[in-house]
Amino acid sequence: MSLVDSLMQPLRQEYSGQLDKFEMRQSRYAGYDLFQKQTNDASGILTPDVRSAVKKSFGNSVVIPVLNADSVTIGNVRSCTIADSENTSKLITLTFVTYAFGFTMTPAQHYNNDVKYQADFNQKLRKYLLQFASTLDTACINKLSTDKNIYWPSAITNIYSQTGNALQVSQAQSPDFYNNLTSIMETLDFYGNYDIVASTSHNPLVRRLTNQGANNNTNQVFQFNGYEWGYTNRLTNGAGIQSTVYVMPKGAVAMENRNDPDAVMGSKVGDAKIWSEVEVPLVNLKMGSYYTKDCSDRSMVNTGTTGLTRSLVEGFEWSTDVCYVTAYNSAPSTKGSPIIKAEISNT
């Protein structure tokens, strides 16, 4: 007689979240971080009144008046008749995108399962939060691309050519790029400190140049004053491009979100349907949440739930509307916009 058969059982452990810790990896979301940071900047383009209006605007439009910087002429003759110089106003309507995600939980599924309820819930939520962060980051990058500068006077193209409204910088030119970039921004009358959103592949160039110290014959550190960098994998490079960057002054972009009225009001139907507003981690947004619970046949969910023909099922959903805003430009083809794109080539 042998005890081998009873001993050779799978040595299963309760789920710890360690062995699979690299299955879902948090990224860097520089585009989204930039929009959030510049929204909260004192010089931001969305005033506190506008941001407050956005929060209350569910089901309505948010319209912001702007004034064009119309051209005027300085004369050389005094006259009794003073010419009119009326301002031109426009109304800008904010555009919102709705995002929603959620999942169900069956508590009885975890009654005799190595993966407990809270671990299962955390994993499900984390999957969606990582995807949501990437989605928001992509939307911010797309907004930068859509509203990037398209006005290129010769004072700029004499330094770098442009293709597809992106400055083209060769490898040979890259060591002096940020020194020239300051002049390019100032040529368009954008002064002060600048934010950079860059592809991850731009990091080696910045690291190499910032480590050219004062005692190095090729010291390049002087050109980096006034720049702040953020990196993202959602900013991809075109063919033959080593890295891509967007640069802009402070307060050039913004974003705001709003939630559905029932979430704001905290509506309830007993304890079976509950709406609320909650602070959501990772994306750091206050979102509307919706909770439900009911009886359902869960026998077909997986092989471990065949007996759950009348089980408690909980539903969790999070949602919000988001608008992305860039600084207004009344004449993009003849007036510089604050968002500049540049590409550093492989050669």
Image (cartoon, rainbow, N blue to C red):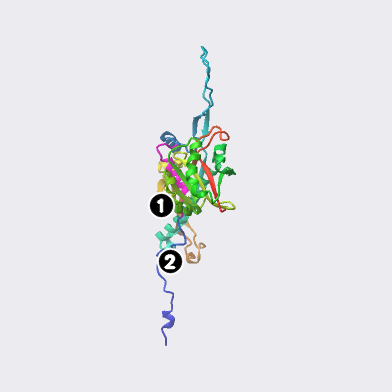
Q: Residue furthest top?
A: 80
Q: Label for residue 213?
A: 1
Three-letter amino acid code of the residue under disc 1: Gly
Camera-near label (2 vs 1) is 1
Three-letter amino acid code of the residue under disc 2: Leu
The front one of 29 and 245 is 245
Q: Which residues are magenta?
A: 27-44
The front one of 131 and 276 is 131
- The residue drawn where x is 47% and y is 66% is 304
Q: Relative to residue 98, is residue 24 depicted above or below?
A: below
- The residue drawn where x is 40% and y is 65% is 16
Residue 87 locus on image (x, y percent): 51, 24
Q: Label for residue 19?
A: 2
Q: Residue 41: say if magenta.
A: yes
Mark 2 surroundings: few (<14), some (14-19) or many (≥20) residues within 10 A: few
The CA span between labels 2 and 1 is: 42 Å
Q: Relative to residue 5, is residue 301 depicted above or below?
A: above
Residue 71 locus on image (x, y percent): 54, 26
Q: Residue furthest front?
A: 217
Residue 231 in view in this figure: yes
